Amino acid sequence: MSAEFWIAQSFNGISYGALLFLLASGLSLIFGVMRIVNLAHGSYFMLGGYVGLTVALRTKSFTVACLAAAVAIALVGMGMERFFLRRLRGEVLGQVLLTIGFALIFQDLALLIWGGDPYTVPIPQVLTGTVRVAGAVFPIYRIFIVGVAFAVGLGLWLVLDRTRAGAMIRAAVDDAEMAQGVGIDVPRVSLAVFALGAALAALGGVVGGGFLGVYPGADFEVLPYAFVVVIVGGLGSLPGAVAGSLLVGLLDNFGKALFPELSYFTLFAPMALILALRPTGLFGRT
Amino acid sequence: MILRRALLAAAVIAILALVAPALPAYPLTLLTQALVVGILAMSLDMLLGYSGLASLGHAAYFGVGAYAVAIMTTEHQAGLGACLVVGVLLAGLTAAVFGLLAIRATGTYFLMITLALGMVIWGLAFRWVSLTKGDNGIAGVPRPALGALDLSGSLPFFYFCLVSAALAWVLMGLLVVSPFGLGLRGIRGSESRMLALGYNVWLHKYMAFVISGLFAGFGGTLWAYYNGFVSPNDVQLVTSVETLLMVALGGPGTLIGPALGAGVIVFLKNFASVYTKRWLLILGGVYIGVILFAPSGIVGALRGRRR
């Protein structure tokens, strides 16, 4: 095991963690405000990737593809929240089954529209290639992903911590009933958070589609990762999503590289350990 | 009430047993599949319907049982008795380990943790290629023999599964009406009240979790024999989720309802996939329909009408 191996694998882990952050931060926020376990969140990622692919092929613009996917999937998420999930408020199991129903429908619709072949979202020329820093080689695209995740994380933190809307979201996370009581329109906050979460997952889908590809089954493949991030980090916590994403990204990468036969085990076993010590996750509140 | 339900179920079992010889091969196969999956659905109902614990990883124990049989029969030519014992015990052991982590959590956390733990087993099935043959799965699991009785024909195997499912139903039925089962229902109603009454809530839930895992594993061992083939698909999230739908569809907390739900889903799935490739679309629609329009399931809806 050379030093290059460790540097390269660490960087791969961090960049994968960055992608997971895009997916999991939205899932965590949605859970925090609405206590909904959204099993369709992986579907947003996959659908976002497909929409981004189609738009990127038509318009030849990666930026437009990201924006179009985010907006389209945000609308899908808002529709789900407004017309279905809201009717089942407080029924944990009902909501879970409902989101699964949507996940299955999305999976089949994606197969119907885009077929079963895997695709890669075309990425701009500037983002291809590698850079060499101190003897180690880094793909530019992966650096770009880390940059996007950093920007999104910073943006989320600024909004949540420094703005009125963010204060309303935090209030709803802490205690939805009290927030409602002091005049915050919690249903509207919920709708907005759902849209934001879906848009972030879709953005992750397009960005991830540039190096992981988009293919049938991607939805249920990323979903457990997002869940582990949220469980490890603590539900509804932004710092938790950051820490969880990095941890899961690194564990997954080193697990696959060092113990290929047990790679999922090396991911889930530490999660189990953290849960045994801190049932609410690293940053979760009891 | 209990007596009437037992009589009803006995009648259903008797009718199934009498009708079976007259059935063509395909419906008989589907009926066998419904019985096997029905055991899994009932095992989850014990957890969800009676203890209020919604597990999203129940396919894990089912899969452990199925893989145990597949590996033992194809690699070591093990007999039915050994396979059943090892399969069920391994599934129970898995549940015993996972339960230690999961039972601490409640509500949504429990859902997410069981989901993630279920993925551990899926990951092992998928990646531990030297043991599980990975994505290819393990093929060629032979039908068993019960002593001198050969169960390889579809009719004898059907009877074997019918007896197994009936046995599982009776055992679980006795369990849920026992003081232990009543304790579980009390916990489902109000955990804090049961704590105040001096019940060991954690132990009750943990025991229910492990016993449920044992029965799910029992279903899994039969599945390996039924299907002759075990693959990571049997352990994946969608299988767990489908089981949850069977319970919700049939009516949680009724045992026989989820078995019925399993039958409906098995038949729907197989018939729909004959006519259309859009089976998942239909299944997704069924989920949404059940949740929005029949939240207490088939049995619940029937009871509601009777009142």
Image (spheres, rainbow, N blue to C red):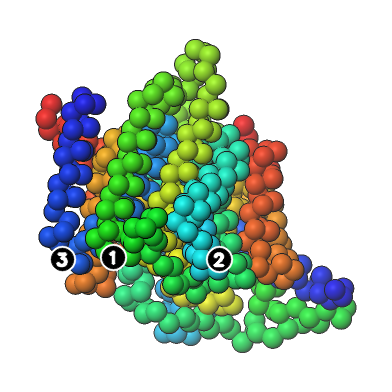
Residue in the image at 18% along x and 28% along y: B4
Residue A173 appears at what percent x and percent y?
53, 38
Regarding mark 3 in the picture, which secondary structure is present there? loop
Q: Report the Cα–Cα distance between label 3 and label 1.
A: 13 Å
Q: Is residue B113 above or below residue B273?
A: above
Check if mark 3 and mark 1 are on a common chain.
yes
Regarding mark 1 in the picture, which secondary structure is present there? loop
Q: Which mark is residue B24?
A: 3
**Numbered circles on residues, count:** 3
Q: Does label 3 or label 1 sit earlier along the sequence?
A: 3
Q: Amino acid at mark 3?
A: Pro
Front of the two marks 3 and 1: 1
Q: The C terminus of chain A appears in which quarter of the rendering?
A: top right
Residue B47 appears at what percent x and percent y?
42, 37
Q: Residues within 10 Å of mark 3 (few under 14, many from 20)?
A: few
Task: Look at the image and tell me whether residue B59 can be seen.
Answer: no
Q: Does label 2 or label 3 sit earlier along the sequence?
A: 3
Q: Report the Cα–Cα distance between label 2 and label 3.
A: 34 Å
Marked residue chain, label 3: B
Residue located beneath label 2 in the image: B76
Foreground pick, A157 / B246: B246
Residue A25 appears at what percent x and percent y?
57, 53
Q: Mark 2 near mark 3, Cβ–Cβ under 8 Å?
A: no
Q: Report the Cα–Cα distance between label 2 and label 1.
A: 22 Å
Q: Which mark is residue B153?
A: 1
Check if mark 2 and mark 1 are on a common chain.
yes
Regarding mark 2 in the picture, which secondary structure is present there? helix
Q: Amino acid at mark 2?
A: His
